[in-house]
Image (spheres, rainbow, N blue to C red):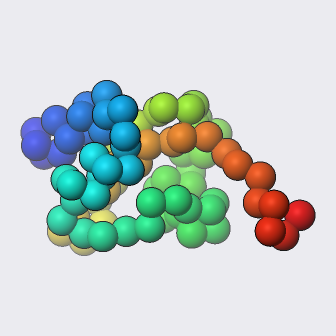
Amino acid sequence: YAEIKTLARGLGAAKNDSTFAQQNSDVRVTLYLTAGEMPEQLRAAIPTFAPGGIYGPFREGNTYFIYKYGGTKRDTSFT
């Protein structure tokens, strides 16, 4: 658990968070999620989201996940 907390701090400080996540992840996941794609634990935290905020660690099975909120973007393909 101490290691995941260290990784969370590193993700928070990373200038390129996508690269940091790819280099430090054992599990490949989508880097960008819609609210509907988020795990329930993360979706429940949406009201507290702030740009640059770190959320988690959340445990799913034997794997811990941490997330960084980069803000929202308008989907211009469907609007």
> Residue 76, position in %: x, y?
81, 61
Quarter assignment of residue 61: bottom left
Q: 37 above or below 35? A: below
Q: Residue reaching furthest left?
A: 2
Quadrant in the rendering for residue 11: top left
**x, y percent for residue 10:** 24, 34
Image-based side of 76 in relation to 56, left or right? right
Residue 12 in the image: above or below residue 44: above
Q: Is residue 11 above or below residue 26?
A: above
Q: Is residue 40 visible?
A: no
Instruction: Looking at the picture, tell me which residue is in the foreground, 79 or 45.
Output: 79
Residue drawn 51% across the image and 42% down it: 69
Question: Which residue occupies the foreground of this view, 35 or 25?
Answer: 25
Position of the C terminus, as image quadrant, is: bottom right
Would residue 52 appear left or right of 11 to someone viewing this image? right
| Left or right placement of residue 31 versus residue 58 in this view | right
Tell me residue 74's x, y (percent): 77, 52
Q: How many marks?
A: 0
Tell me if I can see residue 48 in this picture. yes
Image quarter in which the N terminus is found: top left
- The answer to whether residue 19 is above or below residue 75 is above
Rendered residue at 54%/41% (across/down): 70
Q: Residue at x 57, y 69 (%)?
A: 37
Describe residue 35's horizontal placement relative to residue 57 as left or right.
right
Q: Which quadrant of the structure image shows residue 63?
A: bottom left
Q: Residue at x 20, y 41 (%)?
A: 7
Residue 12 in the image, given as x and y percentages of width and height: 34, 32
